[in-house]
Image (cartoon, rainbow, N blue to C red):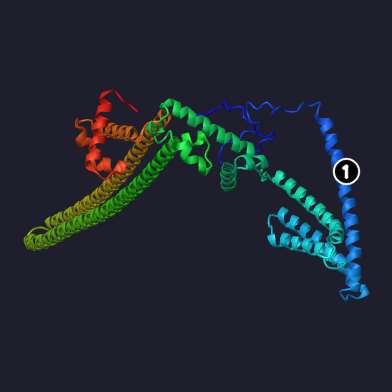
Amino acid sequence: MTITDSPPTAAPTTLIRPQGDPVSVPDTFVSDAPWAVSETPAERPERNLLMGSLSLLAAAGSTLVGAIGFRMSYDTLRHVAHGDWGFSEGLAQWFPVGVDASIVAFLALDLYMIRKGTPWSALRLAAHVMTAATIWFNAAAEGSIMDNPVRAAAHGLMPALFVVGVEAARRLVIRKAQLEAGTASDGIPLHRWLLAPIKSGRMFRRMRLYDVRSYPEMVRRDQELIAYELWLKRKHGGDLTKATEDELLPMKMAPYGYTVAKALAMPADQDRDAEERAEAAERRRLEAETRRKKAETAARAAALRADGELEQVAAEVAGATGQARAHAQAQVSAAERVAQAEEAALETALLAEAKARTAAAERQAADLDLEAARLEREAAEERRLAAEADKAAAAEAQAIETATIAAARQTAAEANRRAAEDEEAAAEARRLTAEAKRLEAEEEARRKAALASVEQSKLAAAEAQQAAAETRRAAAEIERAAVEAEDAAKLKPRERAARKVARMILTAHAANPDSESAEQLVPLAEIQAALDVSSPATASEYRQDAIELLRTGYRP
């Protein structure tokens, strides 16, 4: 509650300046004050002219007073320094300059250091000491002050006026710097100190402790507090003991610089801060959980990649080994077949050679028989006529010629048979070589098929990883939308927890639609880990709330 109607009590006409106070500060006059009337534009030129004239008059008067005071102080101190204090003529001329100029120098240096943000109080103290010293020196220049007080006052008056002018200029410069920097503070009027000294002391304490620089703002706060207290008494029939702790906060927090509005808003602010801290802790926990899951997923992916690479290498090694084994077996089989063919060819050649020897022996036996028959025929023909001898000779020549032709034909047939057998052995060797090449091609095809299967497995694994990433992204989008909806609805932490458990149940049910029990889908340990609670009973309550929420039709 904010009290906006302030009673029309007396208040100064000072503008409330903006400041660095944590509470709100109005930038206008105190409301409902009859004298708080803003100036019209027609009055500003006259006021500016008046202020300018006053500034010129003050500058001229201060300069004249300062010059006269410095001149009188110079003459007085020079004479007394040379005559009574034992200074030489040369030092006596510089002694008053050093005393009076030190005041101006110390105050100017103090102003310079204040503007640079490094004030040093010793400079102002030194200026005040030198001010008291020059007044004392001038007052005591013509003898004891107690002997003739009027004369002493006359001698000390003009140096005092000179110092007053310098101090006034110093205060004007400091005030202007404070106004420019926004650090100027109002003082409490004297009439308030006289009329209410105790309350004025408390107000001064609060203004200085809690950096309230505007006196009208402090008056407005006290008026608001008084009006709120009266309203609270009227609400509870004059008995403030019936008021709640939150309603009594403005009275309790007023000594600490709190306004009524800020004190009443403090419980809501604290609850909001607590909720923000809880939300920040929940976000940090979710981020940690997300990082942990990402690390686990990356580790599993690396393990799967390593297993796939190992299986690929094993398949390649097995394929190479099988190919080498098949190639070696093909070579051994080809070598065995070639050896068998060579052995068969050798056996065929030996048989042919034996048959040739047998044929030669038979031919030799036939020749011997023929020779014996010829000899017998010759012996018989010796007993016959000469004509029959010629006939027998011609018949023998013809028989010899026929046997030679038959032997030549037999030799040619044997050569053709051996050539056919050699051609058959060569064809068998070519067939074995072609068979080995066919086996090698089949092994190569099997190896390529194995590599294609490995690539297909990698592609399927990548697609599965992509589908899992899409599922996680969709779940994250749903979670983010749900969190935004919960933030917009300004739900309590328990309601947020129930909705989170409900989303966990829906996600688990989508992954395992066969299960119908929420206890099987989301165990209590998982709820404890997700919500960072240590009690299984609390996790069970959250799960029961989530089940009731799902039964009422909640969908994120």
Q: Quadrant of residue 317?
A: bottom left
Above or below, 269 relative to 313: above
Nearest the viewer among 177 and 464 is: 177
Visible residue check, residue 462: yes
Q: x, y (%) of residue 25?
A: 60, 36
Q: Which residue is mark 1?
A: 57
Q: Amino acid at mark 1?
A: Leu
**Tag count in the figure?**
1
Nearest the viewer among 189 and 108 is: 189
Tell me the quarter of the image containing the C terminus.
top left
Above or below, 40 relative to 454: above
Crowdedness near tag 1: few (<14), some (14–19) or many (≥20) residues, C-alpha within 10 Å: few
Q: Quadrant of residue 335?
A: bottom left
Specify whether 282 is left or right of 263.
Answer: left
Q: x, y (%) of residue 27?
A: 65, 33
Q: x, y (%) of residue 49?
A: 86, 35
* Name of the residue lying farthest toward the front: 147
Q: x, y (%) of residue 389?
A: 13, 58
Nearest the viewer among 474 and 242 is: 242
Nearest the viewer among 105 and 97 is: 97
Visible residue check, residue 214: no
Specify whether 375 is left or right of 540.
Answer: left
Above or below, 162 relative to 503: below
Residue found at x 34% / y 38%: 468
Residue found at x 24% / y 57%: 328
Instruction: Determine the secondary structure under disc 1.
Output: helix
* Name of the residue lying farthest toward the top: 553
